[in-house]
Image (cartoon, rainbow, N blue to C red):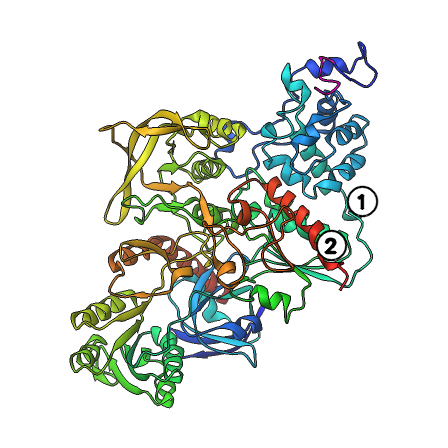
Amino acid sequence: MFPIVHKRRLSRSVYEMGVQAPAIARKAKAGQFFILRTDEEGERIPLTFSDWDPESGVISFIFMRVGKTTHQLSHLETGDALADVTGPLGIPTHVDGLGRVAVVGGGVGAAVAYPVARAMQEAGSDVTVVLGARNADLLILEEEFRSLGVDLIVVTDDGSAGRKALVTEPLRELCETGAIDSAMAIGPTIMMRFCAETAAEHGVPCVVSLNPIMVDGTGMCGSCRVTVGGETRFACVDGPDFDGHEVDFEELMSRQRVYTDEERLADAEYTEECSCRLE
Amino acid sequence: MPAGVSEGGDATSGGDTPRRKPSRAPRTPMPEQSPVERRGNFDEVTLGYSPEEAVAEAERCLQCKNPTCIEGCPVNIDIKSFLARVIDGDFHGGVEVIKVKNVLPSVCGRVCPQEDQCEVVCVLAKKYEPVAIGRVERFLGDFDLACDIEARCHPEVGEPTGRSAAIVGSGPAGLACAQELARLGHSVAMLEGLHAPGGVLVYGIPEFRLPKDIVQAEIDALIEMGVELRTNVVVGKTVTLDELMGEEGFGTVFIGSGAGLPVFLGIPGENLNGVYSANEFLTRNNLMKAYLFPEYDTPIWRGRKIAVVGGGNVAMDSARTALRLGAEEVFLVYRRSEEEMPARAEEVEHAREEGVEFKMLCSPAEVTGRDGWVTGLVATRMELGEPDDSGRRSPVCVMGSDFEIACDTVIMAVGTRANPLISDAAPGLELTDRGYIVTGDDGSTSLPGVYAGGDIVTGAATVIEAMGAGKRAATAMDAWLQRPR
């Protein structure tokens, strides 16, 4: 079992959690992910590290309550434990020698963008972070980014925090003014797609961190296959980072919807189970 | 030709003893669920022998002076002796004989291709039906597992040697290697990447062919012997080979990580929703228990019309699993003819009885779809041409013969290739050009103290071959650990 050592609510449906997993904390690198299972009946779900500490052996991650497993996670507290945590998986984000780079973090993608921006900065790159969310409530880690000392551009869809804009607007400006050599986008698939398209229009390379459905996370099942440059790749072992200009986003978004009905059913049953327990 | 080959041959007391007669009788049938009943559940298909049936079948054995069956077994189990014990009603003794060579009789009795190994060379097979060695082996394995844990046949564990071994992977190769090293008194840690041990026995082979509580009982027995199990450890990621041999202090490492990555055909439409690799389909179902969704959280797409591509045991397992998930029609699409299918005859027969429809000499050309979901599989008819390198007649396209099978799910069961997770993190490890680990006969790799066996060395093969490799490596690892230094 993997004990939960801290938990914090960042917004209405977004939480941060820390879990004791020393072997993983020793090895984790920016951009890598892990797989967790809450209990014996649980699904294996991949989540990306928001932070890790080799000293204390704690890995941290941020999740939004969207389905049964994240709903269950949101009900767990410090002192509870997860049945399984496996990792670190995937290839770390390439952070060396990037020069002037923009890191776009949208929604909970900001959680992944944080260690990535930090690692790029530590590797000597000149980092601009575009931090976006639908509204001020869903905006996370603003202070943490600010304390990194990177150039920070905050945007929200409704203007309730920072600039009223989509993340692609500041990204376009950075590309147009020649302020960046490359970009990395982490967030909802649709956002990464538009970021990649925006960068492509200006000939700026754009890496994206993909989050397809996975089972084992070690290459064994092929559930996470994505088409990149016309070839089938496995996000779990070949990624999760890929050249955003080459990814077939249409296919990825379609594949992410395979179990929509089942996910809804499982969450509805769980919600009912919870309300029964309360009564 | 060995003595005892002639008819009636070398039965213990020669002449017209009563024992000659049962030999000529057909094999004792093993009870099984009816096809109609079993395609509606995930319970085991075959039900195993009763003690009386096991004895009756063992009595068919001629007890040849030169038993050819033993050579037919990849791990050379003393088949003649365990059958003799069963004839005498000494089931404990029978288990003991098997366990000298094979720690997983309940597993191997079920999944070994005996018809190509011990049974094909049974002397009786020349004129009559061979002894059902696998069924008796299974009976003995199950007999042992049904005993109280103290009464079970435990291999004796030697005096602690103070040396240690890490076993990477807890499938058949790893289990056999771990058991052997533990028996020799070494301290053994078995590292498993998934959350549950057993490898292909758990994620790959379905419940209806190999109940998971049997696998668990066999693993429990290993733990009872002192083997330490560490799940959620992905070697190459969580820890590297170097670290295992270095700071983790293991004296030797065995890699039995299995075959790994699923192969796709590279035809259009393979990434449509509703296309699964057999690995994914079976893993969701077997390891994650998606057939019990929503009691278990992992979902699986339950199609109505399913096309399974391939002709091996994994294809049969996928097709039969699809039926049990409620499919109305399941087609098995294979590009050669039934004769060339690598699946076991028994599995093919079971699949057919349950209603799987065989479409032989059909090569998939495209998966068709609408709105991102599968609507059909286009296949080209084939005819058999000249034999290829494998000796099988190779299929040749019949021009203009494309046709479409209407279906909402396609399962690709066309093999696996080597997973580079471990080797990528171990630069000195010599690989074949296809990524499999190069070893000597004793399982030794290019890295000192590191051994390997099973599918990661040979490519996809059988459970018993992997176990044999694990065991052989254990002997070499023992010598390595005991070497003068």
Residue A264: where, in percent of width, then height?
36, 57
Circle 1 residues within 10 Å: few <14, some 14–19, many ≥20: few
Say above or below: A84 vs A144. above
Which residue is under mark 2?
B479
**Helix, strand or loop under label 2:** helix
Q: Give the x, y percent position of residue A75.
A: 48, 70
- B305 or B319, which lies in front? B319
Kindly identify the amino acid type of the residue bearing the numbered disc 1.
Ala
The answer to the question of whether label 2 and label 1 lie on touching residues, with beta carbons closer than 8 A, is no
Which quadrant is the C terminus of chain B positioned in?
Answer: bottom right
- Amino acid bearing label 2: Ala
Is residue A12 rendered to the left or right of residue B205?
left
Residue under mark 1: which chain is it in? B
**Pick the front one: B154 or B440:** B440
What chain letter is assigned to the residue under label 2? B
* Horizontal and vertical percent position of residue B39: 48, 33
The residue depicted at 70 percent of the width and 36 percent of the height is B76
User: Comparing marks 2 and 1, which lies closer to the viewer?
Assistant: 2
Residue B299, compared with residue A112, is above or below; it is above
Residue B151's tag is 1
Q: CA distance from mark 2 to mark 1?
A: 32 Å
Q: Which residues are magenta?
A: B1-8
Asked if the stretch drawn in magenta spans residue B4, the answer is yes
Of mark 2 and mark 1, the one earlier in the sequence is 1
Residue at the (39%, 62%) spot, across then down: A67
Say if residue B284 shows up in the picture. no
